[in-house]
Image (cartoon, grey):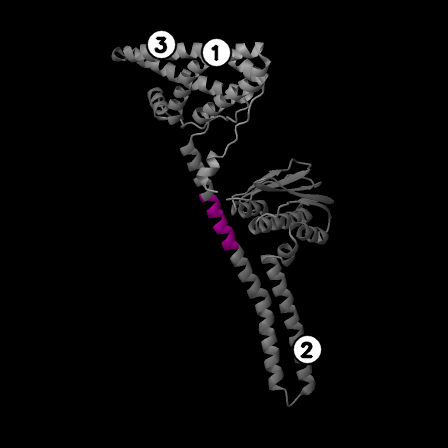
Amino acid sequence: MTIDQQVQQVQIPRPRPLRTIVYMFVSFLFRLLQFVLIIVGLSVGIATAVVWIGFPILMATTNFIRWSADRERGWARKMLETPLEPVERLSLEGLSLVKRWLTRLTDPTTWRDLAYLMLAFPLACVELPIAIASIVLLPMAIWVTPWVGWLHGNLAFSLLGPNRTQKLEQKAERLQASRARGVDAAEAERRRIERDLHDGAQQRLVAVAMSLGRAKSKFDQDPDAVRELIDEAHLDAKLAVSELRDLARGIYPAVLGDRGLDAALSAQAAKSPIHVDVEVDVEPRPPAAVETTAYFIVGETLTNIAKHSGATEAGVKVWRTDAMVIVEITDNGHGGAEVRPGGGLAGLADRAATIDGVITVVSPPGGPTVIRADLPCQW
């Protein structure tokens, strides 16, 4: 799914009949007042701009347009259940009065606000008779009015909703930051694997080679010493195999690929020094990248809980929605956990960011601590 499709994929619910009728009645009065004030303000302001009086009037009208649009967002969200959130406008901090006004004029959101308010009054003139008829005609109230409210909600969302360009820019910035954090996390993982190979299995294999070389040199002169050297080499070889197996498990555990998250997380919980309850419901099975991320988030979190939280028990709950896998880890420890640069929780956030996931930490002093990861199944 592309970024453009994600921006466009917003479901507008059909509002309830009674709320829609109330919305149509009350909105007519406000729309009439808004329409008159905006038209008068713009007309008088433009006509008197040549003698400077019009500029304060135009500034006040611009502020009124933005204020009215914000009220319309809240009103439509409450009555029509349209998913309208407060919009992000251009920053006005540190600007003079005139520059603030000019910034508002160059903000595309201001013009979209004006377009909606100019359309809203003619629509209100049509919706008011429908609301009156809906009071008398029950079938109209049940079937027609909600659809009219749904159409109005779609118009409101298209003009008062998030700016499509800004939304795409924010999405691109977030993906760029996620990619950078993912590269850093991958580089740190590569260095860890290299260090583990150098300090562990490589040293063991060097010891095996040295023991076999010494055994070879003494093969004819001292058979007993050769036997001891071969036994030593055999032991080092087994340790090297064990360390390589642990390293491979740290990269991608076989049980996760073979049996999925439920079995893999249960195996993790069984190794924990504290009691851990595991509940997993992720059907249909998510992509491998999501499973791996969830597995390591749980593993690292349980390790941190055992080391630092003072908890006696923990819980792991994993479930799936249509587009997300949610991982929630709780413990009864002393709390106070927070995401610090370079800390363990920051590492979890970096790991989740590799697939555009988000880590949330709630850990008041005294506990309990809740660590939640929202991992998208599409990116």
* Residue, disc 1: 28
* Residue, disc 2: 231
In the image, what residue type sits under mark 3?
Val
Q: Is 187 contained in the magenta span?
A: yes
Evaluate if marks 1 and 2 touch, with contact meaning CB atoms under 8 Å apart: no
Q: Secondary structure at mark 3?
A: helix
368 relative to 83, above or below: below
- Mark found first going from the N terminus, 3 or 1: 1
Q: Position of residue 137 (x, y in %)?
A: 57, 12
Point out the stretch of residues depicted in magenta.
176-188
Gap in angstroms between the C-alphas marked 3 and 1? 18 Å
Q: Nearer the viewer, residue 97 or 65?
A: 65
Q: Neighbour class for label 1 at 10 Å: few (<14), some, many (≥20)?
A: many
Magenta-colored segment: predominant secondary structure: helix
Q: Which mark is residue 40?
A: 3
Query: Is residue 311 visible from the viewing direction of this image?
Result: no
Q: What's the residue at 66%, 75% (across, down)? A: 234
